[in-house]
Image: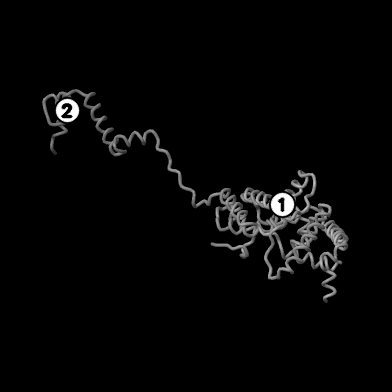
């Protein structure tokens, strides 16, 4: 039986198959989970690609190790992976003792789009500003905002990942977004939003 | 700014950092290295032969040992009984009659 990254077999079933020696399941889980963990870690680590890759690999390593004891129905694989990645990112930020600001060399590779050169420049500037604004948030607010608005998780899923209540998630995301708005509002012109408004 | 922020977040959500091919290869290599073997793929371990089985193999296996054992028992019997017994078993003689005084019944007809 072969699986692809978007197959109908659930992640949890793939974990059981992996533990039973199914190599297709190993490949499918790698393709499904690694990109999500990589993107999430990159956002939490302010775009530090090298560190995000380390976190992604370490998270997946722990996933393979826990697979033989995995019990279907106890937890979602993605929830477990995001939780592990969150803790690994926190550990790395603490060990550095400071939050690294995104440098040009650290800019993550992003999925290509059909924009022209000027459009890509504007988008890249906006993305960099968002990364910097996210980096300015308290850790928990940043995690909640990233999980809710960038990873597309529901509040109950975020609550499970962050091991807090749903109300606390709502509070963190609301405060995080207000703080982001405050940080970015002073840069509207630089980000080209006023030009967009004028053009519209 | 709230609408702009929502647009910006939506844009960022569509542009995730992509894992490099090297990372995907490392992760898959880890997965395969740590993966438990499928039960059907485990080679059966041949049981180690016991001392008696290996000894039997030296002499040609169990049938050869059986023949050897029979010959040994027969040899012991011949040694235990008198040489006359052999004559008795192989044919007939006076000694046989002495050894088995009532041995006539062995050859008597009717």
Q: Position of residue A53 (x, y in %)?
A: 67, 52
Pick whichever, B16 or A194, lies toward us: A194
Helix, strand or loop status at disc 2: helix
Specify the color scheme: one colour
The image quadrant that residue B22 belongs to is bottom right
Q: What residue sits 74% from the left and 61% below the top? A: A151
Q: Position of residue A157 (x, y in %)?
A: 76, 59
Q: Which residue is mark 2?
A: B86
Same subunit, tags 1 and 2: no
Q: Position of residue A159 (x, y in %)?
A: 79, 56
Q: Which residue is mark 1?
A: A85
Mark-to-mark CA distance, 1 and 2: 92 Å
Looking at the figure, which quarter contains the N terminus of chain A?
Answer: bottom right
The disc numbered 1 marks a residue on which chain?
A: A
Looking at the figure, which quarter contains the C terminus of chain A?
Answer: bottom right
> Given the current orientation, which residue lies at the most extreme front position?
A118
Tell me if mark 2 has few (under 14), some (14-19) or many (20+) residues whose alpha carbon lies within 10 angstroms of its own.
some
Q: What residue sits 78% from the left and 45% below the top? A: A94
Tell me if mark 1 has few (under 14), some (14-19) or many (20+) residues whose alpha carbon lies within 10 angstroms of its own.
many
Helix, strand or loop status at disc 1: helix
């Amino acid at each position: 039986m072969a699986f692809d990254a978007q197959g109908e077999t659930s992640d949890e079933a793939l974990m059981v198959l992996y533990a039973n020696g199914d190599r297709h399941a190993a490949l499918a889980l790698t393709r499904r989970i690694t990109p999500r963990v990589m993107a999430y870690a990159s956002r939490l680590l302010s775009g530090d690609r090298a560190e995000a890759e380390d976190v992604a690999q370490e998270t997946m390593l722990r996933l393979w190790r826990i697979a033989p004891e995995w019990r279907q129905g106890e937890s979602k694989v993605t929830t477990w992976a995001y939780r592990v990645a969150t803790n690994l990112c926190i550990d790395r930020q603490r060990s550095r003792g400071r939050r690294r600001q995104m440098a040009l060399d650290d800019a993550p590779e992003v999925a290509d789009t059909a924009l022209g050169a000027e459009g890509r420049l504007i988008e890249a500037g906006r993305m960099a500003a968002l990364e910097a604004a996210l980096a300015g948030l308290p850790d928990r607010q940043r995690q909640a905002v990233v999980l809710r608005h960038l990873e597309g998780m529901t509040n109950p899923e975020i609550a499970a990942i962050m091991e807090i209540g749903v109300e606390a998630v709502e509070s963190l995301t609301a405060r995080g977004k207000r703080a982001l708005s405050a940080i970015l509002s002073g840069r509207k012109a630089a980000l080209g939003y006023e030009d967009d408004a004028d053009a519209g | 700014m709230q609408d702009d922020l929502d647009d910006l977040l939506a844009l960022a959500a569509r542009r995730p950092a992509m894992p490099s091919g090297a990372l995907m290869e490392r992760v898959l290599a880890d997965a395969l290295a740590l993966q438990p073997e499928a039960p059907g793929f485990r080679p059966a371990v041949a049981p180690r032969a016991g001392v008696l089985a290996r000894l039997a193999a030296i002499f040609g296996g169990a049938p050869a040992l059986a023949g050897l054992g029979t010959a040994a028992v027969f040899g012991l019997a011949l040694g235990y009984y008198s040489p006359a017994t052999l004559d008795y078993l192989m044919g007939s003689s006076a000694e046989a009659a002495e050894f088995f005084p009532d041995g006539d019944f062995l050859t008597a007809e009717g």
